[in-house]
Amino acid sequence: MECPSWPRGKKLVHLDLKGAPPRVEYLHELIELFSRLGADGLLVEYEDMFPYDGELKLLQATAQPAYSREEVLSMQEFAKSKGMEVIPLVQTFGHMEFVLKHRPLWGLRELAPCVGTLNPHSEDGVRLVLEMLRQVVELHPGLNTLHIGADEVYMLGEGEQSKLWLASPGRTVEQLFLSHVTKIAKAIKETWPHMTIIMWDDMMRGMNKDILKGSGLVGLVQPMLWDYTTDLDVDKTVSLLEMYCSAGMSELWAASSFKGSTSVYTCVTSTQRHVENHLQWLKVAASLSAAINLKGIAITGWQRYDHLSVLCELMPVALPSLAACLQTLLHGQLSAEAQSKVTERLGISSVEVEVMERYLAALQQQAEAVREEMVRLFPESTAQEWLEEHVSPVMVPLQRITEEIINCVKEMVP
């Protein structure tokens, strides 16, 4: 089914810096490429690569140096020169592993074994989050939009303080979640009244509109609904977006994926899988009512499933997927024209694979010529034995490598 192109709003590329952070020079090359491919914004998840200072300096990475203040500013200036908005993503509730793993901050966890979830009752925890936000915002001059995360808040309600809070009649885990996010959002608005606040939506999906309306969160945040699957349920997703709209949250975002969502340890990105995800999102966008203001889509590229997980596929092997996904959004399908633009803008050529195939074919011809000469002098069995002993150990690995290269290219290049 051919869909209209992505209707409106931003097309953000997600930079997940909690694994394999690019060197600054390469980061600039990537931003240049993202712009050429059709993106007009970056969703930057710094985690421990941000140059936190003062009491937060312990949050900086130790495996490699965090980016310097000058490098963060340089990245923003370069992105702006390419017409790209930079939106930082700072986790404020769940997935705070890079914060709560540090021994001095263990006491801020919701539950001791759960490294990622902040205790929503801890005033010290709230102060910590607000200081993180302050430092990030201040190092992004002219910032207008901020993403506060808040996805996958595991084991919320399991801590002792939460259990005590929930023991009061009528209180629920949903309210506990909403109260913390609302507190953070209000604090942001008090300090930066102009700031647009985005948050992940998944913790709100099971809530009804009345709970959302009564939370105080409506008007403070714009939910970003994420789904990275190839079989995204279009009707269900449309209904969910319409529910948010009916609750008063009419400004909404989508989030797709171009890498890092297939499996925790994927090495080579499957372009087709991610293109199919975007085709489903195009169907969603085409089915929304006029009441919904779709602000844009974040094309996520996860580098780890979480801070303590292994690396997913690296950025270079995922660039064909990103290019194909962006062209799919721009054309409504991965048409021949879209594919041509992908290969043109990435400079992809099939020469390397063709050279390997030709080289292997030449070796096979030479081996066959040797066999034919040998059978003139010896029995067929002697020729076969000699070839298996001296030629096959070279030919078979080459054949396997060539087949693997071809399969990888088919996965990566549409």
Image: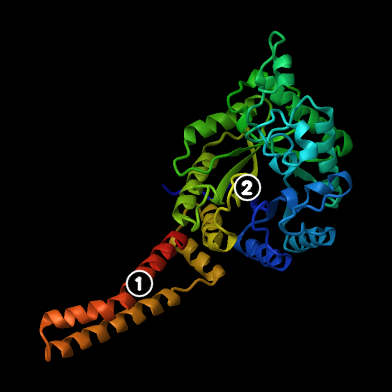
- Camera-nearest residue between 176 and 311: 311
Image quarter of residue 106: top right
Q: Nearer the viewer, mark 1 or mark 2?
A: 1
Q: Secondary structure at mark 1?
A: helix
Where residue 394 appears, as percent x and y from the top left, is 33, 77
What amino acid type is highlighted by mark number 2? Ala
Q: Position of residue 177 (x, y in %)?
A: 70, 25
Identify residue for label 1: 397
Binning the other alpha carbons within 10 Å of mark 1 as few (below 14), some (14 to 19) or many (20 upward) gives few
> Closest to the observer: 340 or 231?
231
Question: Disc 1 versus disc 2: distance between alpha carbons?
Answer: 41 Å
- Which residue in the structure is indicated by mark 2? 298
Q: As displayed, is residue 395 above or below residue 213?
A: below
Q: Quadrant of residue 403?
A: bottom left
Labels 1 and 2 touching (C-beta < 8 A): no
Secondary structure beneath label 2: strand
Residue for point 39% across, 70% down: 401
Nearest the camera: 116 or 12?
Answer: 116
Q: Amino acid at mark 1?
A: Pro
